[in-house]
Amino acid sequence: MFKQSLILLLVPLILAAPQTQASNNSDFVEKALSLEKHGDRAGALLEYGKALRQDPNDSVALIDRAILKFNSGEKQAAFADIDRALKVNMIDFNALRTRADFKAGSNNYKGALADYNEAIKWNKRDTSAYTNRGIMRVNMGETKEALADFEKAISIDNNLIARFNRLRLLPDQTAARAEYERLSKIEAKSQSQHLTLSNAHNHFGFKEKAVQELDAALSENPSYIAALYNRAVLRNELGNKDGSLADYNKYIELNGSNPKAYFNRGLLRESMNDREGSMNDIKRALELDPQLKLREGTPKPFELMLG
């Protein structure tokens, strides 16, 4: 059996990355974000469409719609919106950073690095760009450079997500544990911070605390896909199979393009004696990613996913 891995933090950062400019259609955009938060993806897209019909150059609406599309698995359409935003303003660091996140989430590390560098060129205090570039560099095996990015983000605003990712790389476990104790005393103020603290608790084996942070994140946003996926993983590990299945079902409803979600749900259904459901999920996972065939007989965890 595969042990299921947690989504790390890149896509949550995409969701949380701050916009500095205001939308010209703030009512439409705010309504779209509210609908998205409550799982009404079609309604959110309709509102973004209204905003962009009124102002085709509204870069905030374009970026936010791109994020929704990317998180729903529509990567090509997401890139189209981001590229359109950059035609409006080629030095929009929010758009550059978001396109970098998309590229990193698609394993195009070279392209992502170029966009992160350009975003930082135009805003040297963009902690999300430093942090996400650092996460990508961890996946590239560039530990020294990743640490430098995390340190930079921390120096700007004591960035919580950067602190957790730096903690994971500390060779001194005593220092890592001391930093965890400091992090665990922080009261999360956003859904992405809840996710970060959940990952920190899980990193040190406190799975119940990790689930509690995910519960808090999902109480703020029931459609927060990274939290749904991670809670599904943790609930299964804690023996709550029904809860895990409910979370996988919701996650796949919101993002039906992630083969690992189907694969993990297939393994869960097998353990619940739902052979037909398990076979259908495994089949769908292999349709989405034929390379999963290479892992069928290998009892090792999946690598951490970007989303």
Image (cartoon, rainbow, N blue to C red):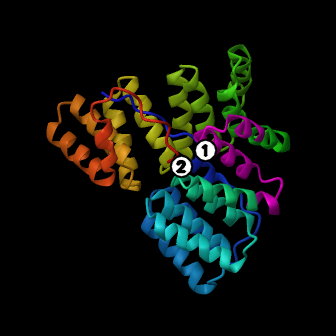
Give the magenta part as a residue range: 119-148
Please tell me which residue lies in front, 221 or 121. 121
Q: CA distance from mark 2 to mark 1?
A: 7 Å
Identify the residue under disc 2.
221
In the image, is 248 to the left or to the right of 211?
left
Residue at the image position 55 percent from the left and 56 percent from the top: 108
- Hey, which quadrant is residue 91 in on the image? bottom right
Residue 114 occupies quadrant: bottom right
Q: Is residue 139 magenta?
A: yes
Residue type for callout 2:
Asn
Q: Vertically, is 254 above or below 47?
A: above
Q: What amino acid does circle 1 point to? A: Gln
- Sort mark 1 into few (<14), some (14-19) or many (20+) by Cα contacts within 10 Å: many
Q: Quadrant of the N terminus?
A: top left
> Disc 2, disc 1: CB below 8 Å?
yes
Question: Which residue, as the protein is rendered here, is positioned at the far left?
Answer: 276
Q: Secondary structure at mark 1?
A: helix
Q: Earlier in the sequence, mark 2 or mark 1?
A: 1
Q: Which residue is mark 1?
A: 191
Q: Residue 42 is drawn in which quadrant?
A: bottom left
Residue at the far top in the pictured view: 174
x then y, percent, for residue 254: 41, 55
Q: Secondary structure at mark 2?
A: loop
